[in-house]
Image (spheres, helix red, strand yellow):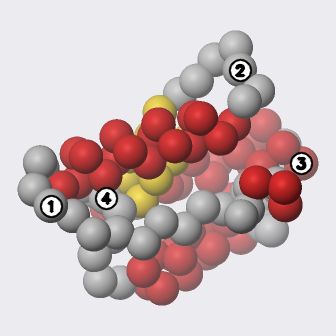
């Protein structure tokens, strides 16, 4: 699963909100793969239920792949296309969780 949050003005507020949900879910600062299934489920459930993210949260589910980067790029492109409603759109993209070799 890849999730994207598109926000215009309050990026730091969204980041703080997601960190608060991480703590409350028990996931904390653990990498996604190191968190338990219950912690991941609780985290995603709380994110999806957060009204402050309505209209800003986009996600896609991919199965039978371990090639993470194309999934991120596809989800990000789809989210930006939907958020822009076909109009010109300028965005700063921040990606969490990339391996060091792919961060460039």
- The residue carrying pointer 1 sits among few (fewer than 14), some (14 to 19) or many (20 or more) residues within 10 Å by Cα, namely few
Residue picked out by circle 4: 56
Q: Using the image, tell me which numbered label, if any, was put on residue 65.
A: 2
Dot placed on the residue nearer the N-terminal end, 4 or 2: 4
Residue picked out by circle 1: 88
For this view, does 23 lie left or right of residue 62?
Answer: right
Q: Could you tell me if the residues under marks 1 and 2 are in contact, i.e. CB atoms within 8 Å?
A: no
Residue picked out by circle 3: 34
- Spatial CA distance of label 1 from label 3 is 39 Å
Dot placed on the residue nearer the N-terminal end, 1 or 3: 3
- Spatial CA distance of label 1 from label 4 is 18 Å
Residue ID at (61%, 75%):
20
- In the rendered image, the residue lying farthest to the front is 104
Question: SS for tag 3?
Answer: helix
Q: Which quarter of the rendered picture does the N terminus lie within? A: top right
Residue ID at (57%, 34%):
71
């Amino acid at each position: 699963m890849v999730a994207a949050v598109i926000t215009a003005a309050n990026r730091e507020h969204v980041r703080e909100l997601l960190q608060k949900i991480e703590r409350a879910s028990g996931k904390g600062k653990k990498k996604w793969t190191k968190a338990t299934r219950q912690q991941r489920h609780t985290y995603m459930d709380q994110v999806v239920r957060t009204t402050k993210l309505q209209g800003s949260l986009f996600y896609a589910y991919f199965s039978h792949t371990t090639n993470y980067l194309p999934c991120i790029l596809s989800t990000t492109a789809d989210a930006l296309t939907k958020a822009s409603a076909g109009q010109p759109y300028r965005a700063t993209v921040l990606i969490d969780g990339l391996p060091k070799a792919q961060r460039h």
